[in-house]
Structure formats: C-alpha cells, structure tokens
Image: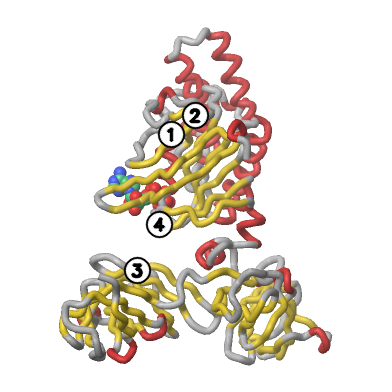
Amino acid sequence: MNESDLIIKLEHVSKTFNGVKVLDDVSLDIKKGEFVTLLGPSGCGKTTTLRIIAGFRKPDEGRLFMDGRDISEVPPYRRPLNTVFQRYALFPNLDVFDNVAFGLKLKNTPQEEINKRVKKVLKLVSMSDYEDRDVDSLSGGQQQRVAIARALINQPKVLLLDEPLAALDLKMRKDMQIELKEMHRKLGITFIYVTHDQEEALTLSDTIVVMKEGRIQQIGTPTDIYNEPVNSFVADFIGESNILDATMIEDRKVRFIGQDFDCVDEGFGQNEPVDVVVRPEDIYIVNKLDSVQFTGTVKSCTFKGVHYEMFVNTDNGNELMIQDYNAFEPGSRVGMLIRPNDIQVMRKRCLRNEFEGEMVAADKVEILGGEFSCNAQEGIAEGDKVKVSVEFSKVDLLDNQEDGILTGTVHFILYKGDHYHLEIHVDGGGHIFVDTNDIWDKGDLVGINILPNDILITKGND
Ligand code: ATP
C-alpha cells in the first residue's frame, strides 16, 4: 500500500493501566476514506485504541501518524478528527440547531456560514425538520443523529465512533446502520468505528480489525474475516461456526470427525494437528446416496425465520450445527456433505501446555507459583530449572478452589464438537489450557490439579 493513501498509522502502540497491558504492540494502517471497525469482546482495548487516536490517551510506547505526520504529541483539539460517543452528550438546555452550531459559535464563525453549515449537516443526518426541537424531546436515534451532526460540523477528516448505536433498540440500530453507511459514502471521509457486535461490524465495514486482550488478531474485509478466520478465536467470535480438532494428512487432505476430506489448504506439515472451521450453512444435508460423505442423527431442529438450525450427532460422536432451508425432524437419519472450499484449516496456537518450572524437591516441581508432585527423574535434581509439558486433557478442574494446587478463572471457552477447550487464567499470572467434557461457564472460579504421571519434565537451559 502506498503511504500517501494512509490517513492514520499506529506503529507498535502499547498502553498499560495499573500494571495491566491493555494494548500490546498494536500496529495498524488506516486508508483515507475507509470505514474501519475495531471489533472484539469487552475489555479487549478497542476504546483505548480510539482514545489514543483521538488524543485523549497517550501511548506508553509506539507512535501515531496522521497524513504521514507524527501526531503523538498533538493535543486532541488540534487533531482534524471528531468523536461520537455511545452517550449522546448533548446540551439539554439548547435546541437541535444550537447544539450543532455550538462549536462554530465558539470559533466566532459568521452567522450566515453557521446557518449554511448547520442546515447542511442536519440534512445529511435526516434531521432538517427538527432544528427548533428541544433535544430532550427527541428519541434516542434522533439524539444520536444530532450528536453525529455536531461531530461533522467541524468537517473532520476522520470521524471516530465509539459504540454509537449501543443504546438504541434493535430496529433503530438496524435503521441507523444503513444511514451511517450512507453518510460515510456521501462524506467520503474516514470512519473509525468501535463495536463488540460482530453483525454490526460485518454490515458496516470496509475493513474489520479483530482484537483480543490488547492484541490484533486479524485485519481484513468482512468476507475475509468470515470465510478465512486466522484462528479459532476469530472463527468463534465472528458468526456461528463448527470448530473441530483435525489432522492435516497432506496438502489438500484433512481428517476430522473420523473422516478424510478434500480441502484447498496447503503448506502444513504431514499429519500436523490443526483446527478446522466449517460454517453451519456450509454443511449440506443430501439425499443422493452417492454424494454423502458421512452420516448422523438429527438431535434438534429450530426455525430461525429464514432457515432451520439443527444440531446433528455424527456417527463418530461429534456434534455439528447445520443451517438449512429444509427442516429435518429430531431423530431422522441424515447424510451430509462438506465441499473442499468450505473447509477452513487453521494452525493451532499450541499443542500442549508448556511451562518453565523449577524442581523444589526430587519429586516436586513448581509451575506458575504452585508446587505439584511429579515423578522423580534421573539426572534432574532439586533446584534445577526444567521444562514442563502437560496435555490439555490432563489438567483437572475442580469446583472447590481449595482442592486445587493452583486457583484460577475460566476465561475463554471453545466448543469443539465433542469437548470444550478452555483457557484458564491462573491467579497470580499465567494461563493453562484445558480440554474437558465438563460444562463450565466463563468467569467460574476453579481449582487446578495435575496428577504426577501427567507431568512431563525435561531439563531446561540455565
Ligand atoms: P468495552 O467494549 O467494554 O468498552 P474495550 O474493548 O473498549 O471494552 P477498553 O475500554 O479499551 O476496552 O479497556 C481495555 C482495558 O483497559 C479494560 O480492562 C479496562 O478496564 C482497562 N482500562 C481502560 N481505561 C482505563 C483507565 N483509565 N484506568 C484503568 N484501567 C483502564
């Protein structure tokens, strides 16, 4: 991309609050005129990124460029951008016209120009008939339109929007989405939008930036992000998906749910464990016996307005979500088909838990601040630094925190068709991944235990 096409550039931006890194090495290029959405779960750092762009927060590390110029030290009011917040922040004692005109009056703009510009932006947000109305008498959607008009009156090059539709009801939100898209098209300026609503992001954006825990996971068009998620977090966060453990047999051949499938992916190792994503609308229930790849039994079938959503148990014991225009009753036997193009293969983040540990006795190792009994190993003695490896399925989670060697909180849950893959944040720092058939909820407090036979120890480098 040509640097002169860029309006905003974040370079290795990091930010820490109270010892917690909420932005970690964020680099991002935003093109002139683009509609970019920062998308991610609550607390992932979207608003902090927007505030750094606006100038309300300073990054601890990294730099921010606008039109090629380093603006890291430029105060917010000198930056050619404006922000629309979730709460409308209008002046209740002023009518619509005066709310929008406020900034221009402060700058002593001639009245004639104020009139012209206010009328123009009110037209753009479809509020021309409301000039004299008290803002308190407006609906939430109308107040947000006034807030947008007030942000646009200064003719910013970039409009920053922080969850501007979050307080509106569903119908109003949908209408406003269409209007925002239209405004963006007419104005031709850059919109940087923050939301945790994936559907909103898919509807509005030219480019989506998916964030998790202060790090960018993927940047791409809505179609890229939906069809080719780079990891299971993105796949799970964007739309409905079946995420399954799989093995890449060789180029263009992958094995999952006990079956070999042709796919289009290449460049993985032979027999490499991978994750696959298959969207529910991409699993076909077929009648023709010769095209059936695998079979199963329908467990449930729910009408969703346009399609039916079914959960089907495959014969090898996996559960798949399928969306189809036809209903198949619970209990029916069905044959299914997945096309090579509809299988998205992703590298796994890691294959087992790996920790740095220290032997505190010949048969006791300390990992993540907890002392676990382990099998004594020849050549490894008390005080040695070691590498510790534990399979995901060998970590026990306990209801009663006191029964665990370590304690932690369930942070992330991924359903993998026949088990759950959990990320546990350990109290005192660090994390452990767990594969389990037990049902836990996000936020559950757990005790963590590992049996001695399941702790694999090798000598570390001093
Ligand atoms: P949400 O959708 O809930 O607004 P977000 O993705 O926009 O979430 P941020 O508001 O950027 O997230 O916050 C990221 C993390 O930084 C959160 O854990 C938040 O509590 C923390 N944080 C943000 N601002 C401050 C602050 N001024 N002081 C301390 N912590 C902060």
Residue 64 marker: none
Residue pointed to by mark 3: 443
Residue pointed to by mark 4: 213
Q: Quick check: is the Cβ at mark 1 less than 8 Å away from ligand 1?
A: no
Q: Secondary structure at mark 1?
A: helix
The mark that comes first in sequence, 1 or 4, is 1
The mark that comes first in sequence, 3 or 4, is 4
Mark 1 crowd level (few <14, some 14–19, many ≥20, 10 Å Cα): many
Give the Cα separation between the discs numbered 3 and 4.
16 Å
Q: Are marks 4 and 2 in contact (CB under 8 Å)?
A: no
Residue 54 marker: 1
Quadrant of the rendered image containing residue 459: bottom left
Examine the rendering and report whether any part of residue 439 can be seen.
no
What amino acid type should be assigned to the residue bearing mark 3? Gly
Q: Are marks 2 and 1 in contact (CB under 8 Å)?
A: yes
Which residue lies at the image location 39% right of the left edge and 51% below the top edge?
Answer: 24
What amino acid type should be assigned to the residue bearing mark 4? Glu
Q: Quick check: is the Cβ at mark 3 less than 8 Å away from ligand 1?
A: no
What amino acid type should be assigned to the residue bearing mark 1? Ala
The mark that comes first in sequence, 4 or 2, is 2
